[in-house]
Image (cartoon, helix red, strand yellow):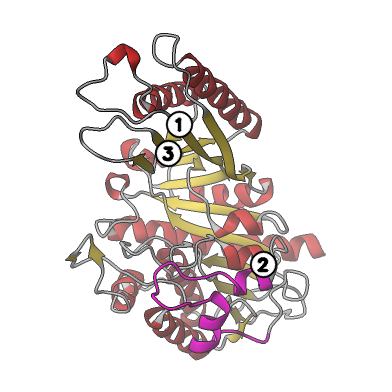
Amino acid sequence: MNQLKIKQGRLVDTIHHTAQWGASGVWGSHPTETGVRRLALGDEDKKVRDWLVEEARLLGCEVKVDAVGNIFAIYPGKDNLQPPTGMGSHLDTQPTGGRYDGIYGVLSGLEVLRTMKDNNYVPNYPVALVDWTNEEGARFPVNTIASAVWAGLQTKEYAYDLESIYDTDRVTFGGELSRIGYKGETDASHVTNPLAAHFEIHIEQGPILEEENKKIGIVTGVQGYSWNRVIIKGIACHAGTTPMKSRADALEMAAKMILKGIEIAEGHGGQATIGTMSVEPSSINVIPERVEFSFDARHHEDAILKQIVEEAEAAFTAIGAYGKNGSKPLPVEFTNTMTSHSVKFDTNNIRTVKQAALALFKAEDVKEIISGAGHDSCNTSRVIPTSMIFIPSKNGISHNPEEYSSPEDVENGFKVLLETIIRYDQQRKEQSI
């Protein structure tokens, strides 16, 4: 275990300090005391970015901003000709966000650099703290877009053309980058601006660690997901004059499909969520003639995820074809709108995190876990060794002003990240000899 002295409480204080930028968070139409509303590339995001850049420069970091606004704060090492070891997450939030999602990862990385500076510690290789742009995809509706561009999975032109869904006037990702001064000159590319590896610490955003009384989650991968749009077409009729046996009720069929879809996912050890639904004509005394709903399916194995979706599509089609008592079949459209394949993190990175965690905590306090949510690490994992660290989330709540991790959990996770970065840096040195 490393012998660097840590300044207790500074990280927690920094988390609350930075919440001032976006502190007028709202839940519904109500202001909150703990929420943060800091949408990507807005004025509040600019303020927290400016603060981060200044803090990094005070530590002696070289700060680079790439063409899609990703900030790289590079703390120097003994051999600065080699790519830095990366630590990254994001500072943007959901419209109804809290103080920890993504923010904790960036500020923990900053605390690693502060701790190195406090102890006059010089790593063998540079260490880069990265703030990835628009991870949430809340204002510009493609999540993790900037890390995707850096990883070569998407083009910067595509990112620039994304339009805000929260502004009255036409506002684009590229335009806002320019407006707030964060369309940088560094290439948004892992080839020309490389990292040796990427480690991301994050709140779990789920209940597993808390329910099992674990202190640290060693993230081995991220489950895949499939987003689908389902449309059922029935016949609008009078709710009082049409007998039940004679109906072509699109909503009744949708209800059967939803229950069946959830049953299929659960049967395969996966998850299914119906997050959106529209009903037409949406009148209290008219039988619905058209229903559209989303079907979000998830599993950590791509083959099983594919099976869940295929079985759901077949079941929905059969339900529509049977209709009411085998009569009045209803047409069903099942369309895939997006698929994100599962991610398996680098085995050496996972091992390094596990060694770091076990140097600080008992084995029964640590758990290997699969992330249920996507992160920028999903994109970095396509091109460099990557892994993640989780800490418990109170009641599993996230994307909500009540999002919370205790000061003890915050400090525990930071210590694991610090130990991980130092161990990985030493491994790089040993392997180069």
Horizontal and vertical percent position of residue 131: 52, 72
Query: In the visual, does 379 lie left or right of 22?
Result: right
Question: Residues under labels 2 and 1: Cα distance?
Answer: 39 Å
Q: Is residue 223 visible?
A: no
| Mark 1 residue type | Lys
User: Looking at this view, is 285 or 332 the one in front?
Assistant: 285
Between label 2 and label 1, give the one nearer the viewer.
Answer: 1
Mark nearer the viewer, 2 or 3: 3
Q: Nearer the viewer, residue 167 or 247?
A: 247
Local SS, label 1 = strand
Q: Secondary structure at mark 2?
A: helix
- Location of residue 277 by image quarter: top left
The residue pinned by badge 1 equals 233
Query: Which residue appears at 49% of the width and 70% of the height?
Result: 109
**Mark 2 surroundings within 10 Å by alpha-carbon count, few (fewer than 14), some (14 through 19), many (20 or more):** many
Compared to residue 430, the image places residue 325 above or below, namely above
Range covered by the magenta-colored residues: 157-185
Q: Residue at x 75, y 62 (%)?
A: 430
**Residue under label 2:** 149
Q: Which residue is mark 3?
A: 293
Quadrant occupied by the C terminus:
bottom right
